[in-house]
Image: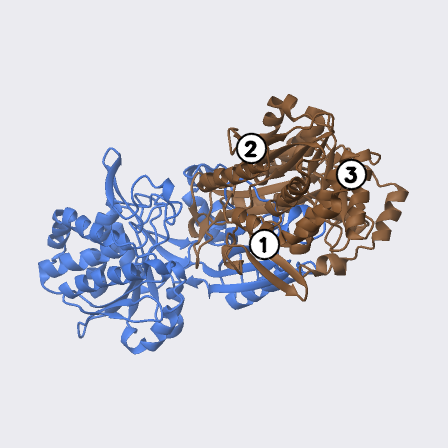
Chain colours: A blue, B brown
Amino acid sequence: MSKLPAILSRLDADLDASLARLSTWLEIPSISTDSAYAGDSRRAADWLRADLQSLGFEASLRETPGHPVVFGHRPKPGAPHVLFYGHYDVQPVDPLNLWESDPFKPVIREIEPGRKIIVARGACDDKGQVMTFVEAMRATLAETGDLPIGITVIVEGEEESGSVNLPAFVKANAAELKADLALVCDTGMWDRQTPAITASLRGMVYQEVTITCADRDLHSGLFGGAAGNPIHVLARIIAELKDAEGRITIPGFYDGVEEPSAQQKLDWAELGLTETEFLGQIGLKASVGEKGRMLIEQIQSRPTCDVNGIWGGYTGEGTKTVIAAKAHAKISFRLVGEQDPEKIAAAFQAFVRERLPADATAEFIAHGASPAIAVPPELPALLKAQAALSEEWGRKAVSIGSGGSVPVVGDFKRLLGMDTLLVGFGLDDDRLHSPNEKYDLSSFHKGQRSWARILQALAS
Amino acid sequence: MSKLPAILSRLDADLDASLARLSTWLEIPSISTDSAYAGDSRRAADWLRADLQSLGFEASLRETPGHPVVFGHRPKPGAPHVLFYGHYDVQPVDPLNLWESDPFKPVIREIEPGRKIIVARGACDDKGQVMTFVEAMRATLAETGDLPIGITVIVEGEEESGSVNLPAFVKANAAELKADLALVCDTGMWDRQTPAITASLRGMVYQEVTITCADRDLHSGLFGGAAGNPIHVLARIIAELKDAEGRITIPGFYDGVEEPSAQQKLDWAELGLTETEFLGQIGLKASVGEKGRMLIEQIQSRPTCDVNGIWGGYTGEGTKTVIAAKAHAKISFRLVGEQDPEKIAAAFQAFVRERLPADATAEFIAHGASPAIAVPPELPALLKAQAALSEEWGRKAVSIGSGGSVPVVGDFKRLLGMDTLLVGFGLDDDRLHSPNEKYDLSSFHKGQRSWARILQALAS
């Protein structure tokens, strides 16, 4: 007889306790990109290690040149074995003044009748999501004394800083990590009622560029009118990255980008995503994306380019009549289809260099390059998970593309020959990477129940 | 019999003591644009007030809504009366890591045999320059017991933050400040051997612009491809501010800009300023200024536009895949001839607004607006000062235009009907507003001697 009803009841009864556990983890500010928080990152890793150990996992921290990976192993001979991936690091919290509560003091709020959320940095991305899986395992173990399949867990601490050390880690530990399937919980639902499996992911090229003109900062009254200004040089390059149609102008950029099939277009049209609905939630009305493309296509299946940060010259209070020596920008590209990250990184650098006036130079820092990924639609695990999700939510789970990147999925495929099932419970209004990040309690609770169902389904 | 030789000898003998006095003043970090230094600004003002008092001036601090003005008065009935202007505030010191010594611990260095400099923030701009005048008065008083003319001194504390409160101060104290002539020591020499009188000054419009798209920072993986990015909007606007010829494209911008006379062009050609010489000192080779204009014209008599600072999005270590809600820039224009600062500020704002895509908004902060100034070439005081400078330096003093702005000169003309004689001893390599600002000891010493000669000349 199925133990599933008992497991689900236990998850219902245990919700408050599971929220308390999540809150404890959220209180640790594991910001991976800022070395000032290195100690906190290790504390966050160790908290999860201890929790996995309490579930009967053989668990440890595995060192990398950066933050450690939490590693847990619970074999089940004769049963399928999965590798679960998540990350314990979180985004920086600036601008801090826009947070309505301390990013590392989680609070639960009711934002409309019956709709509660937990607010904290990492509430969704990715601590909340990771804990949906851990709580599903905890309840299953409590009710049945065992897990239906073998499970290895790796939860890294550098996803928000480009997972720079993860490929080497996966490669070095390939034999231990290889499984029948990978599971990732770092993606979203279609909407609050409709669960989703992410079947394609955009890749990414992230570059930092520094333009230098003079060998020092200059007084604009003495040198203005003659001396090159790197901010103008950088602005002109950024302006030229896209044409009036919203297309990216780097030569060869669209090589490997496929046009959608007629059926794909019909499926998209059926989802009925509107600008009002999607952009209205963030105070915008009209897409600035590529002209002649559907909104869902722009955000999911077309490559993009965004300047994520820019700085140079005097940025303090008041005025300074300076011509800066240097100007900087962080620029990222989301990739799709067969776009080659290395080629695009090189083409971007050439694009910048060709636009440098006399006396200006450019330097680059590569912050990562990963290709786009597609999950085979006929994967049996995908069909099983789809059924389990549909049952939990009472709506057919949809198969979607994600605009975001989860580079590890490419590593699993390339290094371990393993497909990945991406199931997550984030919502578009979760404010990932923004002030007041939140996770709906419905996502947290029904997410746990979803994983409990999926674990049983994968055993069959 | 002229007391001048004795005064000059005393300045020679007193050089070390005068450097010690300057150093004491330089140690006070009177950064006017940063409110954290308000107390230091007042200390710097009070130091000068006490020094003027020791020279027999009736001296006080005059309050303004911002930093106080040092006011000193030493009348001489029957003799000409001049109003001396300078400023005791200094520029911010960032980037601090590029300073080779503490900006507020002055050091004296010999940079080539026989060429010594004093290095500190304000060494030239404007504390060093102000003290050339004060030391000339001190030596004259010591040798003769009197000054040859009546002198009022005002030294303000907000020049580096746009002199926002000075026009009102000049207006409110017009009767007290009105004199036969104003003297300003805040400009430069032609080169290390050739003294100069600055006969024209560019005006300035300084604006800060903030572009807003979404109502919060966004995850580029979720919203990239559709949501407007204010950094791209700002970059495009900045790129469009100048055309391929280096001309500023704001409609009406060049209204009131006169073409130079044939004679002016001959005079410029005679000065023989080359790109190699002028730009070589800052590591550049070629001017990026308006095509078809002489270099000296580009930097002295043509209006300019420079972005002095830009910032938006994530600018920390590592990466963040954010689309910022806001992007900012500080943009200044140097004005010439009859260009109208108010009209140009309005035309700039219209230029920005016309380029905003749907969903983007712009806000502006006006940081000051002042017209360009020209001193009449036949002014008797100008001819007297020219002779005195030529005698001191053994080279004919040249009459030049300055690319910089000294807004108070316009206020003196407009509010007091008074012309201004601009004499200063700065050099192009003084690194004003940059790390490692310095003042040549030859500028400091021969500057004192120059003022001693000019004071005597103005009495005749």
SS of the residue at dot 2?
strand
Task: Provide the residue designation for mark 3.
Answer: B457
- Amino acid type at circle 1 is Ile
Can residue B89 be seen in this snapshot? yes
A45 is higher (above) or lower (below) than A91: below
- Amino acid type at circle 3 is Ala
Chain letter for mark 2 = B
- Amino acid type at circle 2 is Val
CA separation in Å, label 3 and label 2: 28 Å
Q: Are there few (<14), some (14-19), or many (20+) residues within 10 Å of tag 1? A: some
Q: Nearer the viewer, residue A38 or A109?
A: A38
Kindly indicate whether the residues beneath marks 3 and 2 are on one polypeptide chain: yes
> Which quarter of the rendering shows the C terminus of chain A?
bottom left
Please tell me the numbered disc located at residue A248.
1
> Which quarter of the rendering shows the N terminus of chain A?
bottom left
Along the horizontal axis of the image, is B253 left or right of A348? right
Which residue is at 69% across, 60% downward? B281
Q: How many discs appear?
A: 3
Please tell me the numbered disc located at residue B69.
2
B437 is higher (above) or lower (below) than A337: above
Q: Residue A164 in the image: state x and y as whole percent.
A: 40, 67
Q: Residue A433 in the image: state x and y as whole percent.
A: 38, 49
Can residue A303 be seen in this snapshot? no
B441 is higher (above) or lower (below) than B175: below
Chain letter for mark 3 = B
**Discs 3/2, front:** 3
Which residue is at 13% across, 54% downward? A7
